[in-house]
């Protein structure tokens, strides 16, 4: 293999997207296929694990073939198989992992296991060719809200995290109670543009001990109480105002703690990652506040913020070139922590 050319096939099935991508040298996307199951889960108001696993089984081979076809490459040209092995839904993870192991074994190619959050962080390497550690990364998704000191491509220190709900989970729950549907984040983002950010004051939680942790269950409960109060008085509520005011409360805390983390560590770069990083208000507030603090903000394109396999292939590349190899007994770890991976 040419030292400078390494092609990774990435596989991601940790939740409700069956995704396969081909990435060159950890930075260049050759193909990135995402088969979303959102429509299937919408009627249940959230992801149903058994349905997710079954759909992954049905989709995975088709998505792999499409990723190879779009990349115009053959199996011989793939150097490494990268796959998410945690955290996530165990049945869903196992579909991607078993497929990756079967491919690695049959093709005699190295297998690299990737932590899903490490993948989200790596999405920034695909969007910003010059970006290198160290930097601060705010990882905000449906299951995670972490402020991470990215010390190296696979060397992380978690500086803050949620003590209850993840940011995306709060978006999804609030969207449900105000009748917007699932998934809530993009719907709140859209309707908030027609609302007043300061119409209703929802709480912004910060901890007295100087911790960079988050808590989003209070803001969610506060939205619920607000709606109940109006219901009891027989009054209607304004969806757009609630969405804009809730979004503002969450965004303010995310931005404040992340900028604080950059100041504490003396780092000048901040990257955003995960589904909530697609939020337009979050991007907007970071883009105005970070330069005022002499910080540079990086964020991936929206399609690379939400779950995809290109980010997994990028993270797998950096693990592979650092010498990490994974045996055929690699198992899915539903609650894998970032420091264990
Ligand atoms: O990273 P992701 O695709 O999956 C997980 O790893 O969880 O993130 C999905 C989460 C969902 O909670 C979704 O509502 C949220 O990201 N999300 C957004 C936006 N787009 C997706 N939240 C706020 N604004 C958005 N534009
Ligand atoms: Zn994710």
Image: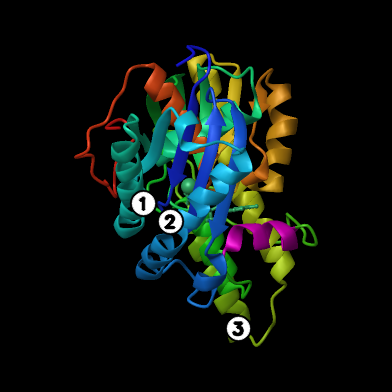
In the figure, 151 relative to 196: above or below?
above
- Mark 3 or 2: in front is 2
Magenta-tinted stretch: 183-192
Residue at mark 1: C-beta within 8 A of ligand 1 = yes
2 and 1 marks in contact (CB < 8 Å): yes
> Which x, y percent locates residue 337?
30, 38
What residue appears at the point 26 percent right and 46 percent down from the top-left corner? 333
In the figure, 250 relative to 177: above or below?
above
Q: Distance between the residues labelled 1 and 3?
A: 37 Å
Left or right: 156, with 280 as reference point: left
SS majority, magenta: helix
> Which x, y percent locates residue 84?
38, 42
Q: What element carries label 1?
A: loop
Q: Specify whether residue 56 is painted magenta.
A: no
Left or right: 20, with 334 as reference point: right
Residue at mark 2: C-beta within 8 A of ligand 1 = yes
> Which x, y percent locates residue 163?
37, 47
In the figure, 288 relative to 43: above or below?
above
In terms of depth relative to the viewer, which is nearer, 50 or 209?
50
Residue 337 visible somewhere in the drawing: no
Residue at mark 1: 88
- Mark 1 or 3: in front is 1
Residue at mark 2: 15
């Amino acid at each position: 293999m040419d030292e400078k050319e390494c092609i990774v096939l990435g596989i991601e099935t940790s939740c409700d997207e069956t995704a396969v991508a081909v990435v060159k040298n950890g930075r260049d996307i050759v193909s990135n296929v995402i088969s979303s199951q959102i429509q299937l889960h919408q009627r249940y108001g959230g992801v149903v694990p058994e349905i997710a696993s079954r759909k992954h089984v049905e989709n995975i081979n088709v998505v792999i073939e499409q990723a190879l076809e779009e990349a115009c490459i053959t199996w011989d040209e793939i150097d490494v198989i990268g796959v998410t092995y945690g955290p996530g839904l165990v049945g869903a993870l196992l579909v991607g992992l078993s497929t990756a192991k079967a491919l690695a074994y049959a093709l005699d190619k190295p297998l690299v296991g990737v932590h899903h959050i490490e993948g989200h962080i790596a999405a920034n390497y695909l969007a910003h060719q010059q970006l290198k550690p160290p930097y601060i990364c705010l990882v905000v998704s449906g299951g995670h809200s972490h402020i991470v000191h990215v010390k190296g491509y696979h060397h992380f220190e978690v500086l803050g995290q949620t003590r209850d709900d993840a940011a995306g989970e709060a978006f999804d729950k609030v969207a449900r109670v105000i009748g917007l549907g699932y998934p809530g984040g993009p719907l709140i983002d859209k309707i908030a543009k027609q609302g007043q950010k300061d119409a209703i004051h929802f709480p912004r939680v910060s901890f007295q001990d100087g911790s960079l942790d988050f808590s989003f269950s209070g803001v969610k409960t506060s939205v619920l109480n607000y709606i109940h109060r109006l219901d009891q008085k027989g009054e209607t509520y304004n969806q757009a105002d609630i969405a804009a005011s809730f979004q503002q409360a969450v965004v303010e805390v995310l931005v404040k703690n992340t900028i604080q983390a950059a100041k504490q560590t003396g780092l000048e770069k901040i990257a955003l990652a995960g589904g909530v990083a697609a939020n337009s208000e979050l991007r907007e507030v970071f883009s105005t506040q970070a330069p005022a603090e002499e910080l540079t903000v990086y964020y991936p394109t929206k399609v690379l913020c939400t779950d995809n396999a290109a980010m997994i292939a990028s993270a797998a590349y950096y693990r592979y070139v650092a010498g990490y190899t994974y045996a055929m007994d690699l198992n899915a770890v539903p609650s894998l922590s970032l420091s264990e991976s």
